[in-house]
Image: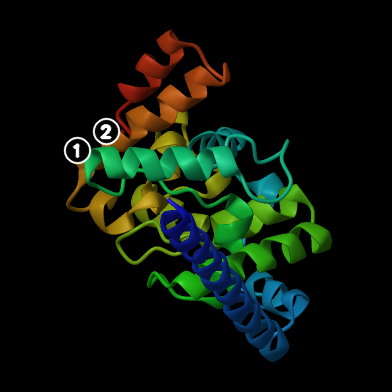
Amino acid sequence: MKIIKKWLKRGLFLLLLSFLLLVGAGYVQYRIVIGETPLTEAIANVQASENYVFLEDIDPFFLQAVVAVEDRRFYQRQGLDIRSLGRAVWTNLKNFDFLEGGSTIGQQVGKNLYFDFRFNVLRKIAEVFLLYDIEKTISKDETLELYVNMNYYGDGYTGIKRASVGYFGKLPSELSLGQSSLLAGLPQSPSRFQLSNHFERAKARQKKVLGDMVDLEIITQQQADEIYMEDVYE
């Protein structure tokens, strides 16, 4: 029994040491990217794009849909969303598929500002440090604005302006409820949901978006059903 306890203590110590080393290495990664391009400069570079759209020029229903499906406690919470992270891990393990992401909108903004889309543990840790920097530097509305402007929506469209014009020939302020809720679901996996060749998958994802909005009492189930049936290309 004493030997078992001894090895358990050693195992726990090694796990803790490994965790601390990973966090330290992630912090170094964070310091490197911030040193190369300060956060305010990285944000300004994105906002300088000719396709950048400010929040007041984006359909409010689209923004509500994005928050509902991507980070429902975005406006109430600071820092990491541990509940969402745990739920995403469990859902993905249970279904043997990547169905949910556990990153907050702020984390995804940090990733989009500094990293590519390849998974890397150290980068995920660096994203957490970036998240706290972002929350100290800009407001929630500005964070959401950056998020929808940097997201990839499939079919070569990066940013909500290019996506709304490219898919529907409309500016982001002119989107219908059906178009807004459809676009809101695409960034989770653009290659799987892009409208050119995966429209049915995108519609299934739209149903998830609308369901989340019903759960949050933004719309009723009857409204969700009516929006889902809309012909987005009419």
Q: Residue drawn at (45%, 14%), measured in percent from left and top?
A: 223
Q: Is residue 206 visible?
A: yes
Question: Callout 2 environment at 10 Å: few (<14), some (14 to 19), or many (20+)?
Answer: some
Of all residues, the one furthest to the bottom in this rendering is 36
Residue 179, located in which quarter of the rendered image? top left
Question: Callout 1 environment at 10 Å: few (<14), some (14 to 19), or many (20+)?
Answer: few
**Image vertical order of residue 120 relative to residue 109, above or below:** below
Percent position (x, y) of residue 213?
A: 50, 24
| Gap in angstroms between the C-alphas marked 1 and 2 | 6 Å
Q: Amino acid at mark 1?
A: Glu
Q: Which residue is mark 2?
A: 204
Percent position (x, y) of residue 201?
A: 22, 41
Q: Is residue 171 left or right of residue 167?
A: right
Q: Which residue is mark 1?
A: 200
1 and 2 marks in contact (CB < 8 Å): yes
**Quarter containing the C terminus:** top left
**Image vertical order of residue 220 relative to residue 178, above or below:** above
Residue closer to the observer: 119 or 60: 119
Q: Amino acid at mark 2?
A: Ala
